[in-house]
Image (tube, helix red, strand yellow):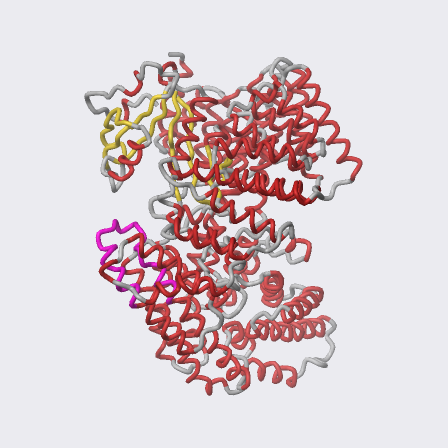
Amino acid sequence: MTTLRRFVADDLFKFNNVNLDPLTETYNISFYLQYMAQWPDYFVAAEAPSGSCMGYVMGKAEGAGKLWHGHVTAVTVAPECRRLGLAEELMEILETVSEKIYNGYFVDLFVRVSNKVAIGMYEKFGYSVYRRVLGYYSGADSEDAFDMRKALPRDVRKESIVPLPHPVRPEDLEW
Amino acid sequence: MSALDRQLRPIYEALDSYNNKQAVALCTKALKKGENQTIKALKAVALDRLGKEDEALEICDEIKRTRPTDDAVLQYICMVYKASKKTQDVIDVYTAAYNQAPRNEELANHWFMALVRVDDRKQMQQAAMKIQKQFKDNSRYLFWTIMTIWLQRVRQAKNGPEGTKGMLATLTERMLIKAAEDGRIKDYEALQLYIEVLETHGKTTDALAVINGEMGNLCKVQADRKHIVARLCKANKSWGPLRAVSKELLLASPDDWLSYCNYIEALIQILRETTDADSRSNIIEQARSLFSVLESKASSGKRTKRGPLLAGLELEKALQTNKLQEADLPKLSGLVMEYLEKFGSNLSCFDDVRPYLSLVPANDFDGLFQELQKIDAKGLTIASVRRLVTIEKIRRWSDTKLTADEANARAEHYIAAYKATVPLGADFDERELQPGDDYILLLAHTLLDRHAQKRGVFFAVVYQSRGDFACSSDTAAEDRSMLADVAAVLEYGLARSKFNYQIKLLLIRVYVELGKKLFLDIVLSIDAMRIDICAGVHKRMFDVAKTMDIKQIQHDTLSYLFTDDIELLGCPETSLRALVTSLTIYGSNERETPEMIVQAFKFGTYSKIPEFIRFRDRLKNSLQYNVSQRQLYRVEILRRFPALDNLGYYLEILDENILSFSDDYISKLSDNRDLTLLANWTSSGKPIGEVVSGTAFPRKRDAWLKLHALIPLILRGMCTEGAPLPADDLTDLKRAINEAQEQNEDSEQLTAADILLEVAGAVVAARTHADTSASPGKWDSKTWTGILDRLKRASFHPFESILLRLFA
């Protein structure tokens, strides 16, 4: 009982029940609008029958050559809508967009190495750790990140997800 | 490296490291050796950054007169112009540059974007057409032209002259048809624009032909394409095709709520057109069996989807409300029970079934409510608690008014139930909701109901004793203590669930209400010792608000929850900070959104252009913006008093644009406040914020906005010696007071305004007499005594005390 549709600018006025959750950051106007302007299909809202926002996913396409891929920037679900499989649906949309519209080789995302729940969830969705990025998260809660990937049909031999044996530094990231 | 590069490099480095003084020095030194526009422009940037705006602009104007075409020079001087909001200068320099170098595509783009930033649609169109002619091969400029015409049509859609509207519409459509014929619609965004234009003109059949045709392949996700087909079928009232496409969508995705709604709407319309009873029941059976197929499909996946079962309810409800079928209450009741059985332990379950509860006979829930009585603390699991909470909410929804005893019993039950759940959440991450949190809210709501019932009594006492306010102190104390109880309950829950925003928001509202009452006591001098308690309440309220980390766009949508009435709390410094912070989003909108509209043009995301413009306008014309700004003026006026010079200076610099108060201005404001956020589980649907305050919450602001525009304007007139005090303002104020009275605004606030009206009237009279050097006439001691007398009687409001001191 979810309506999945493009996220629109006016949704910023009504996504509070999602964004008041301590794990979801509220960014400035340009952050959201830039994604909408550049990758309108990659920013998808899940709407409840009452019209309230249940969650959303935002992503982008980047890279070159065999590194051309979809990237998950944020995926979030309102506390009252968790455990309904919504995150997976949102991730599937992002994968569809990466495959059908942008024709990428894989989808990737970054996650804090300490966030076991999220890592377990992404593994269930078919993602695997590709490499560790040292000190990816800076600031007070400085931490390493896992770069997790899921291959798309275009990567026939699943080359993009063969794990790197050694960690990398943020400045070594290609994108 | 050229000689120029050698000069430029250190300047760039200084600017990059924000060493602006050094940058200026380097530029000055380099310019002594010879004239160079790039260096000159960089000097202007550095000066501007140092706060030397005038010098910077002088240099820019000097460069502007030479009609530069160098890209870097143009960018630097435009940075300075933009920082000073001199948008016309930006347009002028780029127009001049483009006219000199019309083949420079980069310049052409800058010129067009400068026009986009100021949203001059006519000029945008002219520019786009010129650029399109110059660079014929690039389809993007063709679509810029089309878009700019379409935007003019959008702007005129509401109140433009019919002829122009029709002309613009036809022009857009023709250009798009031509573009389609020429094969220039080559991406999904262009296709969407084409379809939207056809749709807006009611040409849904044509639009359907486009999306179903070859061009429809530009939409690469099948489901998206079908959703467009469904939208167009609906607009076209093609019910058969709508039902068919919705069915396809549902078979592919059995949780797609929009498609269920479309399917049911189509079905209802088809049934209306079907007269034969057998065919009708046949059609209904088809729907039911489709939904049951979808249900088995949906439960075979990893997670059972709620869609099919809920859609079954929606279908039965639609059949009943449209009188297409005899009411079958047991069936509906059975479906609701089945839903509760399967999904009762989902946090959203109550909200899911809420629209259908009124269709279930009241007694049918009795069995469920029985479950609530026997809570076995040992047998509780997280899932069973969530299910119980869902049923509790249904019970609250079904409650008619509880007696005092019943309410007490209920409150005790909630406390016991909550305590039983505490161990279950002991190991949760602190950012997660505790399983029993909603018991805390149910308890707080029940206590607030009781408080609201009692308040009727308090008010009666207060009202009768206007002249002798103090006699209500006993009841006022009881009123306060009931609110304090609610606060204590919420604090108790918050201690275990530190991030529950529902608890926090309600707590904030309760503290604001409590703070208002305590402050009233202080002003009334009933209990001056309460100042400390009062300050404590404010502090805690602001501390809780701070933990919510309200920022960015939330300043517009959520600030009202803790800034409404903030000016009445008697804590000017903190109020001021809160209001100033909440106003920052409007500056961000002015700075950021135009750039994003530019981005949408750049990336050819045509669907987003009108969308971003609408977004920008909603923030620009925000009701909350106007409210916060007036509150800020109010707090500042109170804060600066009694230093009349300081106050007078402040009143001089008020922004008159935002203090507009015409009906037209106020009716066009956009109310972006998020009113859906605070939970409420009663069937009356009365927002809990209103239960707390006893008045409309958030306040109705129409009359308020007028009053609080006129009050500072009139005060300004009074404080500025020799300034004319427009009699019109007084008439307007009189009118606004009457209007507010009709809308039942707080009487204390209106008394203040009413006294101001009288005082201002006296000032006008005095000034008129002074001008004509006539004798004081009506301006005699009697007038003064009358006013002073009223002021004393009404001294429970801060505004009064100000006026009292101002004119005593």
Picture layout, residue B517 above or below residue B94: below
Q: Nearer the viewer, residue A124 or B312?
A: B312
Q: Position of residue B351 (x, y in %)?
A: 46, 53
Extreme-front residue of the structure: B278
Q: Main secondary structure of the magenta part?
A: helix
Q: Nearer the viewer, residue A21 or B720?
A: A21
Picture layout, residue B634 above or below residue A54: below
Look at 31% across and 68% down and name the residue there.
B415
Q: Position of residue B804 (x, y in %)?
A: 54, 77
Q: Is residue B633 left or right of residue B546?
A: right
Q: Is residue A32 left or right of residue B501?
A: right
Q: Which residues are magenta?
A: B416-443
Q: Nearer the viewer, residue B303 or B469?
A: B303
Q: Position of residue B347 (x, y in %)?
A: 38, 51
Q: Position of residue B246 (x, y in %)?
A: 57, 34
Asked whether B470 falls inside the magenta stretch, the response is no
Report the number of discs: 0
Asked whether B437 falls inside the magenta stretch, the response is yes
Picture layout, residue B521 above or below residue B176: below
Quarter of the figure with residue B124:
top right
* Viewport quadrant of the C terminus of chain B: bottom right
Quarter of the figure with residue B278:
top right
